[in-house]
Amino acid sequence: MKTPLYRQIQASLKEKITSGFYPEGGLIPSENDLCTEFNATRMTVRQALNELVKEGYITRQHGKGSIVSAIRKSLGLLSLKGWTEVVGASDRHGKTVILENPNIKKIEEPIFKHLLDVESHAEFIFLKRLRFVEDTPVMLEETYIPNEELPNFTTEPFVEGSLFRTLFMKYQIDVNGMTQEVRAISADKAVANLLKLKVKSPVLHILRRYSTSKEGFYLYSSIYCDTEKFAISSFN
Amino acid sequence: MKTPLYRQIQASLKEKITSGFYPEGGLIPSENDLCTEFNATRMTVRQALNELVKEGYITRQHGKGSIVSAIRKSLGLLSLKGWTEVVGASDRHGKTVILENPNIKKIEEPIFKHLLDVESHAEFIFLKRLRFVEDTPVMLEETYIPNEELPNFTTEPFVEGSLFRTLFMKYQIDVNGMTQEVRAISADKAVANLLKLKVKSPVLHILRRYSTSKEGFYLYSSIYCDTEKFAISSFN
DNA sequence: TACTCCTACTTGTCTATACAAGTGGCATTC
DNA sequence: GAATGCCACTTGTATAGACAAGTAGGAGTA
């Protein structure tokens, strides 16, 4: 048995939560039920459940049970919120426009030099997206994805329009952490035009490296953010 | 026995780590040693150790032992690094200048309205500090601390020059989380002068609410950051 | 009806034990 | 001397139980 039992239980439950088999706000089976289902002891089941708590999938309540988190954070407890979290849950309407269809590129921009751990994979899939809130452009995101073992990635649309969800559902790659640098800069002409700002307006510039469950598989993003109307917030 | 045994073990180890009894980078006693010391079983000791990992006090290595984290994060896994973490560990020399000695104020600034959960405690201790790296001013921080049960706070100097360390050591208040909003703004005259920038330079503006181990005790900070030379980075 | 109490079920804490697997040093061997 | 293999010690995973404490609902009582 290569992967530990508690990891298997954890993965099984995670799958049932993300697929909606256990609905948001509902209870998952009790520890004892899970013990019989997986033929394990309570300590082992609890270890799996504690991992899910850490990842933000469930919360636990003494005397009641384990509750599926209402807002399923696809990034666990990451620093800056993901797009869906900035927009989500409110009545605000979000939209994403792909400016440049996925194509193969190399990272030559020196801006990522701090974040690159090895000297750049041969090739990356490049993705340029503009995100709107209430029909106002607020975020320009340029993403680099390693061009390895991702069949049909550039030809098929995203699952639910989400990159992370696509990686998770179709390629079993789970984004589980990140490193980032945040700066305030003056918008250049290109960025200002896309975000409908005056040139030299202050914008947030974020450089990110996402780590995943796949060894050595990192995503890189360069993000420009208009924080005039909507600030970037983070919790805990 | 009111507090659980594993919490007692956790607190005892935390105290020995923060006091320097277990030096940074060194090993704490093995699980079995801790079992005999506290007269507990390994599962109980492991629960305490896992909590300390979550809080960032130690890392564990299979086959070797539990290592005291080199950079003791006083904020656990918070989003944006604390001052000591931005500067620390490198050869860079940090310095903090208190511009305005601690004095009693009320929060009337509307900028905190999103973060205030109750309508402002009666009074706050106000603190205005300018932080330097390599003799360059990079951060202007205005902090509001509830003026409750903090004897001698305004008259005695900080422990090791650190606010959080003072709260922890002298008042047993542990800062354990935060909520924040990040924006890019143009520096006004006052901020620009202090940070030695041109007026209207882009600066990072961060509004923070720190939560603590003391019920209902929140700190508020407004931070202006020059990110030209030093970006704000965060991990995990 | 309204209240209390009891009970079944849940998670929280804890004991005692076992084997697996990674690390590092010592002793033996070449 | 250098390489190998063994061994002691470490953390990782897992079993099988026990009692405590919080929750919710139903039975019985006022």
Image: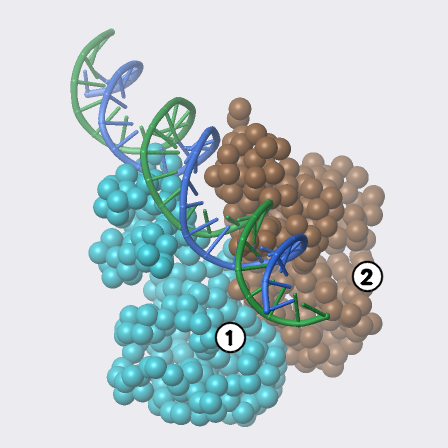
Chain colours: A cyan, B brown, C blue, D green
Q: Position of residue A226 (x, y in %)?
A: 51, 77
Q: Amino acid at mark 1?
A: Arg
In-front residue for pair B62/B132 = B62
- Identity of the residue drawn at 37% across and 54% down: A4
> Mark 2 highlights which residue?
B97
Residue at point 47% right, 75% down? A216
List x then y, in percent, for residue A180: 55, 72
In this figure, which residue is indicated by the disc labeled 1?
Answer: A209
Q: Is residue B52 left or right of residue B104?
A: left
- Mark 1 lies on a secondary structure that is strand
Q: Nearer the viewer, residue C24 or A231?
A: C24
User: In x, y percent, where is residue A144?
Assistant: 45, 83
Which subunit holds the residue at mark 1? A
In the rendered image, residue A115, in percent from the top left (x then y), is placed at 57, 78
Q: Is residue C24 left or right of residue D14?
A: right
Hey, which quadrant is residue A87 in on the image?
A: bottom left
Residue at mark 2 to residue at mark 1: CA–CA distance: 34 Å
Residue at 27%, 87% (x, y): give it. A155
- Neighbourhood count class around disc 2 (C-alpha, 10 Å): few under 14, some 14–19, many 20 upward: few
User: Do marks 2 and 1 share a chain?
Assistant: no
- A65 or A38, which is in the foreground? A38
Instruction: Choose mark 2 or mark 1, whichever is in front.
Output: 1
Q: Which mark is residue B85?
A: none
Residue A223 makes an appearance in the image:
yes
In the rendered image of this protein, does residue B151 appear above or below residue A201? above
Residues at marks 2 and 1 touching, judged by CB atoms closer than 8 Å: no
Three-letter amino acid code of the residue under disc 2:
Val
Q: Is residue B11 left or right of residue A165?
A: right
Disc 2 chain ID: B
